[in-house]
Image (cartoon, grey):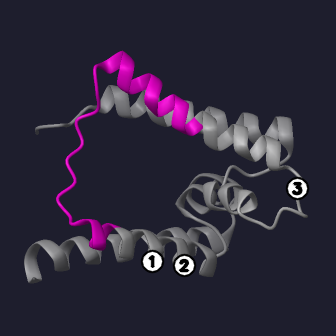
Amino acid sequence: MEGFTPVSGLVGGLLIGLAVVLFLLLNGRLAGISGILGGLLVPAEDTDGRGWRAAFVGGLLLGAAAYALAAGGIAVRVEAALPVLVVAGLLVGFGSRLGSGCTSGHGLCGIARLSRRSVAATAVFFGVAAATVFIVRHAL
């Protein structure tokens, strides 16, 4: 199987899990990316927590950049046109607002807290993703 990397997947998963647990223990907040990013996009009058939110998002970007530098780049090939990516991004954003959270918030944090709502949301996320891949690759 090309691209099957269980060790790096395991290490990455453990690091993500550790980060989520530490974030909850140290800050009392869930590490849901859509909520953290959404908090940066609120009007300027509501600046509660803007600093830690900016640091969190900045850390995500800097972490990816540091990995790319250390690994000599990231081999990702996107086979979709820009308009498709823009529409897909808007749909994901709308869906995460509609679902009161994203895959990181529900899948990592909610399921770990045994939230039935998060289990249902994550099942829907993955079900729709699987159906979309099937339709795009086999039906269209």
Query: Which residue, given by chain and number where applicable, does mark 3 sit on?
Result: 47
Q: Residue at x 66, y 72 (%)?
A: 116
Q: Residue at x 40, y 68 (%)?
A: 126
What predominant SS class does the magenta segment belong to?
Answer: helix
Frontmost of labels 3 and 2 is: 3
Q: Is residue 126 magenta?
A: no
> Quarter holding the C terminus?
bottom left
Query: Which residue, given by chain and number where applicable, does mark 1 sit on?
Result: 91
Asked whether the beta carbons under mark 3 and mark 1 sit within 8 Å of each other, the answer is: no
Query: Which residue, given by chain and number where applicable, does mark 2 sit on?
Result: 94
Label 1, label 2: how far apart the Cα atoms are? 5 Å
Label 3, label 1: how far apart the Cα atoms are? 27 Å
The answer to which of marks 3 and 2 sits earlier in the sequence is: 3
- Check disc 3 and give the amino acid type: Thr
**Which stretch appears magenta?**
60-85
The answer to which of marks 3 and 1 sits earlier in the sequence is: 3
Q: Quadrant of residue 68?
A: top left
Say whether residue 80 is left or right of residue 118: left
Q: Which mark is residue 58?
A: none
Which percent across, then down, holds residue 50?
A: 81, 49
